[in-house]
Image (cartoon, rainbow, N blue to C red):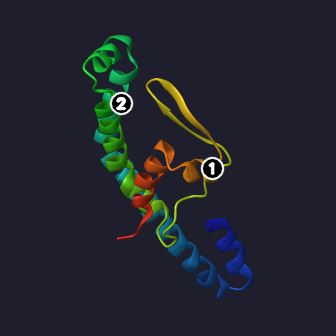
Amino acid sequence: MVSTSLILAACAWWLVPLLVIPAVIVHRLGSNDVNRWFDLWRAARPEIRRRRVWSEANTDPGPAKELRIFDLEEYAVARQLHHVLTAYRPIWAHQNVGTGSPPSPGPIRSSCSTSGLVEAGTHDELLARNDRYARLYGIQATAYTLT
């Protein structure tokens, strides 16, 4: 930008401020947004770590067996979901500022549990079934409302 400004100043000095000032403003606004993203991700790290612990308890053979024996699978999945939502709600809200809606869903979605694939189909089909996918999507979609 400096070299362009020097060349432009040789031809028409008055164009330099017209080009530099908007460029600086856009750069400042963009860097503030990037800094906000980093702050949000940094703040979410503890919750993401907690979710990972519950996920490993659900998928590693030893802990997963204990969860099945004591019938705590649903509790473990609920804890994972809680930590995921706690971590990502601010990020989703920041991502969708001004739109108030989630990103458009892809053509095929599925719902899984510790026992494997539970449902498969398009987004609209799974919502129409009003089963596990619809319930989880409803919970996630609450993060898209602006407060």
Whole-percent x and y of residue 94? 43, 62
Whole-percent x and y of residue 91? 41, 55
Q: Which residue is mark 1?
A: 125
Q: Residues within 10 Å of mark 2 (few under 14, many from 20)?
A: some
**Residue under the image location 61 percent in, 58 percent down:** 104
Is 46 displayed left or right of 143 in the figure? left
Could you say which quadrant of the image residue 50 lies in?
top left
**Residue under the image location 40 percent in, 60 percent down:** 142
Farthest-out residue, bottom: 14
Whether residue 49 is visible, yes or no, is: no
Q: Which residue is mark 2?
A: 52
Q: Amino acid at mark 1?
A: Glu
Please state, as top left, top right, bottom left or bottom right, where the N terminus lies in the image: bottom right
Farthest-out residue, top: 62
Whole-percent x and y of residue 23? 58, 73
Q: Nearer the viewer, residue 54 or 8?
A: 54
**Residue under the image location 36 percent in, 48 percent down:** 85
Helix, strand or loop at mark 1: helix
Q: Amino acid at mark 2?
A: Arg
Q: Is residue 57 above or below residue 82?
A: above
Whole-percent x and y of residue 4? 69, 69
Q: Nearer the viewer, residue 20 or 59?
A: 59
Q: Report how far apart the C-alphas of labels 2 and 1 lie in the structure.
A: 30 Å
